[in-house]
Image: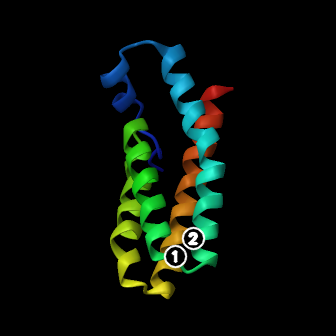
Amino acid sequence: MDTPLDLSVLESMFGDDEELRTAILEEFASSATPYMAELDAALANRSAEGVRSLAHKLKSSSRTVGASQLGDVCELLERSAPDQDWDSITAQEQQLKDQLERVLEYIRGISD
C-alpha cells in the first residue's frame, strides 16, 4: 500500500533537519482536530462557503507536508462546495476524513 505522506516534500523545503520536520508534522496533526470541527460546523449549517474555505486551508497545509492524496480530496471538496450538492459533499467529506486518518496514523507511526 502506498504511504499517505511523501516525506521528500518536507526534505526538499527544510533539508535534513529531522527535528524541524517532526515539529511541522506534529503541528499539522494538531491542527487536524480544529479543522475537522470547522468542517463539521460548516456541514451542519449547510455553509458551502465554510466547506470551501476549510477545504482550501486543509489542501494547502496537506500539500505542504507531502500529503498529496489528502490535498487532492480537499481540492475536489473545495471545487464542489459552491454547487451545494450536499450528497456529493457528504461523500467527499467521508473520503477526506478517511484520508486524513491515514495521514495522522502515519505521522503517529513516525513520531513514536
Vertically, is 51 above or below 15? below
Please tell me the numbered disc located at residue 42: 2
Give the residue type at disc 1: Ser
Residue 61's image quarter?
Answer: top left
Vertically, is 44 above or below 101? below
Vertically, is 79 above or below 24? below
Check whether the beta carbons of the residues at disc 2 and disc 1 lie within 8 A of each other.
Answer: yes
Please tell me which residue is depicted at 48% across the width and 68% down the height of the picture.
51
Please tell me which residue is depicted at 54% across the width and 38% down the height of the picture.
28
Badge 1 element? loop
Of residues 67 and 60, the one drawn nearer to the viewer in this rendering: 60
Of residues 58 and 100, the one drawn nearer to the viewer in this rendering: 58
Across and down, in percent, residue 16 comes to: 40, 13
Please tell me the numbered disc located at residue 47: 1
Please tell me which residue is depicted at 37% across the width and 44% down the height of the picture.
63
Across and down, in percent, residue 75 comes to: 35, 62
Is 4 left or right of 107, judged from the image as shown?
left
Give the tally of numbered discs.
2
Please tell me which residue is depicted at 46% across the width and 52% down the height of the picture.
58
Seen from this angle, which residue lies furthest right?
Answer: 112
Badge 2 element? helix
Is 75 left or right of 112, judged from the image as shown?
left
Residue 65's image quarter?
Answer: top left
Vertically, is 13 above or below 36? above
Structural distance between the alpha carbons of marks 2 and 1: 5 Å
Image quarter hosting the C terminus: top right
Give the mark nearest the N terminus, 2 or 1: 2
Please tell me the numbered disc located at residue 21: none
Across and down, in percent, residue 37 comes to: 65, 59
Give the residue type at disc 2: Ala
